[in-house]
Image: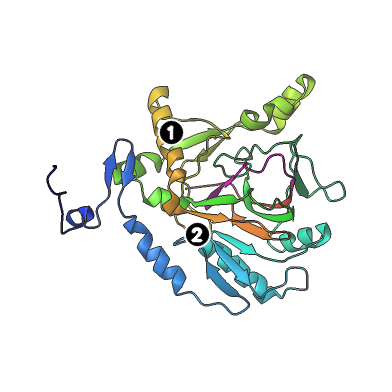
């Protein structure tokens, strides 16, 4: 007969207190650097809508405001403040027409035209993601949008036209938290480092051979800081992704590849993420500088139709 099982009086974490530590190439333990931001967001107050926070530092649903009607300038200013605070904000039950969608987006700046994704047939400012059994979803990789532009999007407003009953969620990751979670030596290394972004990594196959030179002239490779400062908050955030970054500007290619992989993996931590389950006429508005997003491609062969307006931004800087 075997002896009694070992019994312990303390949780294994008791001896570790609030310390994080590495196990191989991942970190375990409490993400204590999120505490101040979580407390700050919890203390915010709002006049034109109610807020339900989704995760400690990222994501909030805004209730009590109608995006299809006339929205006052003070309400728009407060929506902008909520965007900067929560990094991505969501609205339910907003049956926007394409015209209303574009009009709302224009309250926040000029809109861009995407050269590589088909638009709404009547409104070119709206990219239309129409997924079916024949057109599958390939947006399931962490990325900021259009970082291959000299002036990438400031933000994007995505409207759910048709969604599957189950699946097709979008995840968002707080890239301020991802930067802050790096150790001091890595932060010091990347603060003055650039990454080279290239449209051809994702969209090059769509360009006919006779137009390659023309498109390269229109969209040359562009260098952006790996950890720029947000133009509104002044906080540093990670700004690299596997979809559009060709390489980091470092001396040794192997060193750059290892560092790039480390930085991209920071989006994998659920502690930095929120997840949004779409319903018909839900709307997401994200700060394209502050977050990366990942559209879960788990709904094939169901239909998922989304339309996106993207707001022109400024060039990232240190």
Q: Name the spot of residue 258 as percent of width and height, x first.
A: 39, 29
Q: Name the spot of residue 195 as percent of width and height, x first.
A: 50, 35
Secondary structure of residue under mark 2: loop
Which quarter of the picture shows residue 160? bottom right
Q: Name the spot of residue 214 as percent of width and height, x first.
A: 75, 26
Which quarter of the picture shows residue 138? top right
Question: Residue at image x 82%, y 47%?
Answer: 120
Q: Name the spot of residue 190 as percent of width and height, x first.
A: 39, 40
The answer to whether one can see residue 104 in this image is yes
| Looking at the image, residue 293 lies above or below residue 40 | above
Q: State which region is magenta.
A: 290-303
| Looking at the image, residue 1 lies above or below residue 96 | above
In the picture of the structure, the residue carrying the numbered disc 2 is 58
Work out which quarter of the rendered image holds the N terminus and state it.
top left
Q: Mark 1 to mark 2: distance in Å?
A: 23 Å
Which quarter of the picture shows residue 265? top left
| Looking at the image, residue 213 lies above or below residue 10 | above
In the picture of the structure, the residue carrying the numbered disc 1 is 261
Would you call the spot at circle 1 few (<14 residues within 10 Å), some (14-19), or many (20 or more)?
A: few
Secondary structure of residue under mark 1: helix
Question: Residue at image x 65%, y 51%?
Answer: 166
Q: Which of 192 and 269 is in front in this view?
A: 269
Chief SS of the magenta region: loop
Q: Does 97 sit left or right of 86 as displayed?
A: right
């Amino acid at each position: 007969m075997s002896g009694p099982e070992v019994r312990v009086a303390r949780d294994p974490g008791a001896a570790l207190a609030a310390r994080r530590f590495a196990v191989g190439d991942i970190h375990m333990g409490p993400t204590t650097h999120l505490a101040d931001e979580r407390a700050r967001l919890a203390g915010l107050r709002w006049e034109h809508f109610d807020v339900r926070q989704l995760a400690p530092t990222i994501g909030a649903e805004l209730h009590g405001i109608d995006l299809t009607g006339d929205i006052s300038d003070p309400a728009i200013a407060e929506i902008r403040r909520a965007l900067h605070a929560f990094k991505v904000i969501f609205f339910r039950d907003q049956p926007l027409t394409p015209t209303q969608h574009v009009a709302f987006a224009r309250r926040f700046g000029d809109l861009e035209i995407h050269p590589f994704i088909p638009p709404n047939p009547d409104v070119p400012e709206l990219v239309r993601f129409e997924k079916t059994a024949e057109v599958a979803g390939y947006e399931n990789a962490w990325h900021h949008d259009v970082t291959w532009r000299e002036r990438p999007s400031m933000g994007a407003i995505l409207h759910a036209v048709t969604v599957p009953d189950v699946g097709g969620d979008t995840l968002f990751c707080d890239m301020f938290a991802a930067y802050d979670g790096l150790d001091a030596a890595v932060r010091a290394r990347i603060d003055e480092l650039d990454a080279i972004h290239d449209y051809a990594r994702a969209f090059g196959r769509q360009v006919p051979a006779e137009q390659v030179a023309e498109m390269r002239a229109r969209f040359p490779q562009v260098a952006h800081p790996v950890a720029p400062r947000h133009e509104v908050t002044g906080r540093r955030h990670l700004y690299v992704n596997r979809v559009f970054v060709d390489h980091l500007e470092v001396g040794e290619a192997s060193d750059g590849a290892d560092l790039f992989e480390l930085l991209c993996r920071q989006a994998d931590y659920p502690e930095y993420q929120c997840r949004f389950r779409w319903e018909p006429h839900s709307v997401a508005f994200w700060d394209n500088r502050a977050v990366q997003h990942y559209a879960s491609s788990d709904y094939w062969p169901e239909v998922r139709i989304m339309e996106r307006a993207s707001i022109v931004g400024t060039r990232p800087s240190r």
